[in-house]
Amino acid sequence: MPNAHGLGRFISSLVGVDRQAVQEAFAEFLAGRTATAGQIDFVNLVIGHLTRHGEMDPKLLFEAPFTDTAPKGPTQLFDADETRSLVGVIRSFNDAASA
């Protein structure tokens, strides 16, 4: 039922999120570092998911297709602080969808 998570979240789940907005948020996440090909592939998977679905449960980072790039999840590619930051960006989209 859409009201269980709010109308904004329901609409986002139907139409997704603007790809440009998602890319900009993750460009900030990657700024100031030299990302590996694996990190870029992983972030692109997250961008694709958010673009299509408008939100994302961070637990999905430990499931396929993310584990196809990093079998142990994001902690295989990013240190603890970077992983927290990655999840923070995801949660910011989730929060926006709930508004």
Image: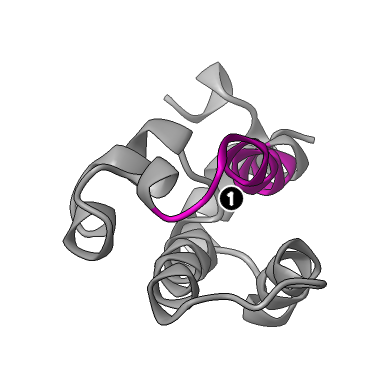
Instruction: Give the quarter of the image for residue 23.
Output: bottom right
> Which residue is at a point 25% across and 42% down the rendered structure image?
72
Q: Nearer the viewer, residue 6 or 27?
A: 27
Q: Nearer the viewer, residue 47 or 55?
A: 47
Q: Is residue 85 magenta?
A: yes
Q: Position of residue 77 (x, y in %)?
A: 43, 55
Q: What residue span does the magenta drawing correspond to?
A: 77-94
> Which residue is at a point 27% across and 56% down the rendered structure image?
70
Image quadrant occupied by the N terminus? top left
- The residue carrying mark 1 is 11
Q: Is residue 84 above or below residue 48?
A: above
Image quadrant occupied by the C terminus? top right
Q: Main secondary structure of the magenta part?
A: helix
Q: Position of residue 2 (x, y in %)?
A: 50, 30
Colour treatment of the image: one colour
> Which amino acid is tagged 1?
Ile
Q: Is residue 3 above or below residue 92?
A: above
**Could you tell whether 62 is left or right of 45 in the image?**
left
